Image: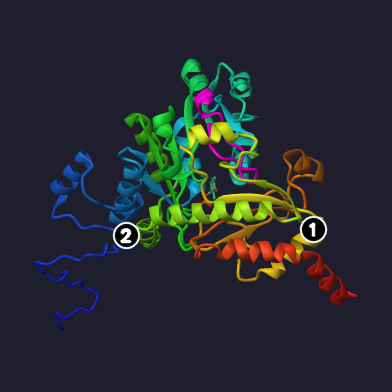
Amino acid sequence: MTDKSLIRRVDWPSSVSRPVATPLQPSVVYASPDPDALDAQYDQNSGYTYAREGHPNADILARKIDMLEGTQDGFVLGSGMGAIGATLLGCLKAGDHVVGGDQLYGRSLRLLTQDLPRLGIETSLADPTDAAAIKAAIQPNTKLILVEVISNPTIRVADMAGIAAVAKETDVLLAVDNTFTTPRLFQPFDHGADIVIHSVTKLLAGHSDATLGYVAAKDPTLNDAIRAANVTWGFTPSPFDCWLAERGLQSFDLRLDKAEANAADLAESLSKCENVSRVLYPTRTDHPDHNRAIALLGGRGGNMVSFELKGGRAAANALTRAVPQIPFAPTLGDVATTLSHPASSSHRGLTAEARMALGISEGFFRVSVGVEETGLVARELASAINALQRNIKVIDEARF
Ligand SMILES: *Cc1c(COP(=O)(O)O)cnc(C)c1O
């Protein structure tokens, strides 16, 4: 017999100094001294017991996003959709009704219109740039309004003041998915929101290597109900993802400011390209919601630019092939610029007519601008677009 066992943990080395970088704590379970101590821990909701219920890396990340959103007690979930799912599960019951923006993120629309009805919860969709349309969609059993501030991919800006007034007047909860705007452009709690939601996966984490969400509700009872849904339905996040995201978040403000400057620069360059029929960027005077965008976002435009290329799908294919250094990928918020084509990705489920009604043609692109050195992306995209006619010809010749 031996009293040596490799599976017994040794104590963490003690040191008077402490790490400068955030430690990664992957432990699923936490040992308590005795049952009295465990009881007290549950009663007082203090300390960690089991990682699905909470862990240090999630809490550290949540405190930082709380700081950005001007709140406390927000929490992190395993994805942005987890954040939206837990919010709905925590706030609603069978017989309730939801009003959603008609241009929400695709999976959010699917959750509202296809999954909630199976649970006895109905949804109406309405145009968030028109507060009267949101108001008209409210029913006696409406419990929650879910909107995004900037729509994807057409960059329309919601009438947040009007919607907040409707929510207050009708005593309905207002939940804002602040993923696109980020707290650097817009802080929903200062504009009447009851609940703030993020896909942390995007700009906050910023490096396309962690899938996470965040929720905070102003009312502590509601916040607890959403947190309980997170823990019970198992939407809780991995410590490693939280650790990566907290590391990414350290440069969030620098990344956003640089990406925004590059986006404005790109929008200007695209507007001068003969092969571009339309550029959508909030601070441009030709943007359909320009005045509202300036007032709401404090003169900032964010990192997302959409544009329409002449020449339809053939031109779209030629463009993505002409700039292989800019990943053609259906996401946003990466540290580097990425290019997405809604007609073949987020909006492929719609009919061509429904897409056209939204202004999403085969030549429509959305750019998530990154932090490349000043001028690089604008130069690369504009020169690729200006050379398009030639590229289309080369592709056609290669094919036949
Ligand atoms: C990506 C995204 C989501 C979903 O987030 P995931 O982390 O991918 O689950 C929700 N809302 C918006 C606006 C998004 O862009």
Magenta-tinted stretch: 146-163
| Image mark for residue 117 | none
Residue position for label 2: 28
**Residue 145, image x and y in percent?**
53, 29
Q: Identify residue type, mark 2.
A: Val
Residue position for label 1: 313
Q: Residue furthest right?
A: 400
In this rendered view, identify the residue nearer to me: 51 or 347.
Answer: 347
Quick one: quadrant of the C terminus? Answer: bottom right
Q: Main secondary structure of the magenta part?
A: loop
Q: Residue furthest front?
A: 272
In this rendered view, identify the residue nearer to me: 291 or 53.
Answer: 291
Can see residue 120? no
Name which quarter of the figure residue 231 lies in: top left
Q: Is mark 2 within 8 Å of ligand 1?
A: no
Q: Residue furthest bottom?
A: 1
Mark 2 to mark 1 CA distance (whole Å): 49 Å
Neighbour class for label 2 at 10 Å: few (<14), some, many (≥20)? some
**Residue 70, image x and y in percent?**
33, 38
Task: Identify the secondary structure beneath mark 2.
Answer: loop
Q: Is residue 387 above or below residue 293?
A: below
Neighbour class for label 1 at 10 Å: few (<14), some, many (≥20)? some
Looking at the rendered structure, the number of numbered marks drawn on it comes to: 2
**Residue 119, image x and y in percent?**
57, 34
Describe residue 195's horizontal placement relative to residue 151 as left or right: left
In this rendered view, identify the residue nearer to me: 74 or 208.
Answer: 208
Verify whether residue 42 appears in magenta: no
Can see residue 195? yes
Which residue: 52% across, 20% down? 166
